[in-house]
Amino acid sequence: MEQYAIKGGIPLVGEVEIGGAKNAALAILAASIMTDETVLVENVPDVRDTNVLLQAMQSIGAIVERVDRHTVKINGAHINSLTIEDDYIKKIRASYYLLGALLGKYKKAEVSLPGGCNIGSRPIDQHIKGFKMLGAEVKIEYGLIATEAPKLVGSHIYMDVVTVGATINVMMAAAMAEGLTIIENAAKEPHVVDLANFLNSMGANIKGAGTDVIRIKGVEKLHKTEYAIIPDQIEAGTFMMAAAVTKGDITVKNVIPKHLESISAKLQEIGCEIEESDDAVRVVSSKRLTHTQVKTLPYPGFPTDMQPQIAVALALSEGTSIVTESIFENRFKYVDELTRMGADIKVEGNTAIITGVTKYTGASVTAPDLRAGAALVIAGLGAEGYTTVDDIKYIERGYEDFPAKLQGLGAHIEKVETEKDFRKFQLEVV
Ligand code: UD1
């Protein structure tokens, strides 16, 4: 079984180039089929989730050409099926973005009900409500979510919860509806804004993305565009936490520092030094970190996708920290694994009470989901001795070249497949 083998205890130092945002890419790639003209998308991360989505798009007749590792050309002129029932697609949550994209363009779509990371129940009622308010019928049967509309008509939609997925899905469908749609209580995440910018570059008329109220004037047709995806806020944040945990000095490059503010602020609060420039953030961790409180919130609050990583840093900090998860109810599954590495964490409901310890020790642990998996890797890098992280398929869903990027910062980490590989790794890094 593939796993990451890690020898911890080395401060990570250097610069790391951050790739395109996975979550923006998933929305933008899906939206690319909304025109019959060819769309060029740059800065697409080469990770499992984006590749699975591209495969699913190909399976319904989209032409996908990889210009280079991070650039794809997509043509949706010859879509020949509006049903996506791919076995793989269920594994990625964002498969449902094809619903909004196909519904907008063809007024009909059927997609396997999404799965994704097992971080709690993930309802789709707000997506359904949004589609219905645009005039579509929505049915769930035979494991598919099916939606169809004689025509889509703009509407005034109030989201009951702040949801990235539903905001994105409804935005796509409404971009090609008749008349004005207003989404209230919209999500403000950078990838919501990126999708709006992308759709506008295709001729859509979307205003207010990045605020609570998004106004979309539907257009009949969208056209070709060339577009580069924003940098990945969570990949950047993960490396920033790696600096904090390993007592390192890491500069994340090719980032938008504004998108990282909630993460930078917390790191500063617990004793790291932060230096920002136009498109880079440097994190220096030179002393014992101190405790704090973190509550995950929709953007611009502290991202739920960074909760496990900061918990790994706080578990090594002086004093007692409190981490409250307010977005997903099942996001503390890494705690038992981290406890095996020496952490002292007690979970009560959606709160983790973390009593700082002075060190982690290496152990065999298993990634329970994407971000928690990355967090366990960071813990291994900060631990004494050897750690193995299993189930790295989760991590590979969202981190491109994770071991190589960490090696570039001086880490001893390698992907191994057998016990023999692991022994070899141990001999090499002694
Ligand atoms: C997206 C991100 C994910 C991130 C999450 C929160 C992608 C592909 N994934 O997930 O990495 O962790 O945002 O920032 O971009 N909800 C409902 N009804 C709905 C939809 C959501 O009640 O119809 C609730 C969810 O249960 C959750 C909250 O709304 O409590 C936020 O979920 P949402 O923002 O939709 O997350 P995703 O789009 O699935």
Image (cartoon, rainbow, N blue to C red):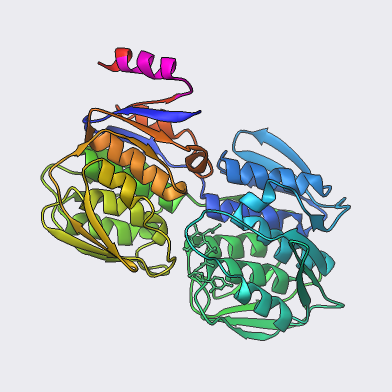
Q: Residue 287 location, x and y as percent?
A: 10, 44
Quarter-of-image position of residue 260: bottom left
- Give the extent of the magenta segment: 416-426
Task: Provide the major secondary structure of the magenta segment.
Answer: helix
Of the pair 7 and 261, the residue shown nearer to us: 7
Screen quadrant of the C terminus? top left
Q: Residue 426 location, x and y as percent?
A: 31, 17
128 left or right, relative to 268: right
Q: Is residue 424 magenta?
A: yes
- The residue positioned farthest toward the bottom in the image shown: 156
428 left or right, relative to 270: right
Is residue 117 placed above or below 1 in the rendered structure? below
Q: Residue 72 location, x and y as percent?
A: 68, 41
267 left or right, relative to 390: left
Does the rendering let one see residue 279? no
Is residue 238 placed above or below 34 in the rendered structure? above
Going 52% across and 38% down the picture, which residue do you hit? Answer: 393
Does the rendering let one see residue 64? yes
Q: Residue 141 location, x and y as percent?
A: 77, 67
Report how many numbered discs are placed on residues in the image.
Answer: 0
51 left or right, relative to 112: left
Q: Is residue 382 magenta?
A: no
Is residue 243 placed above or below 81 in the rendered structure? above
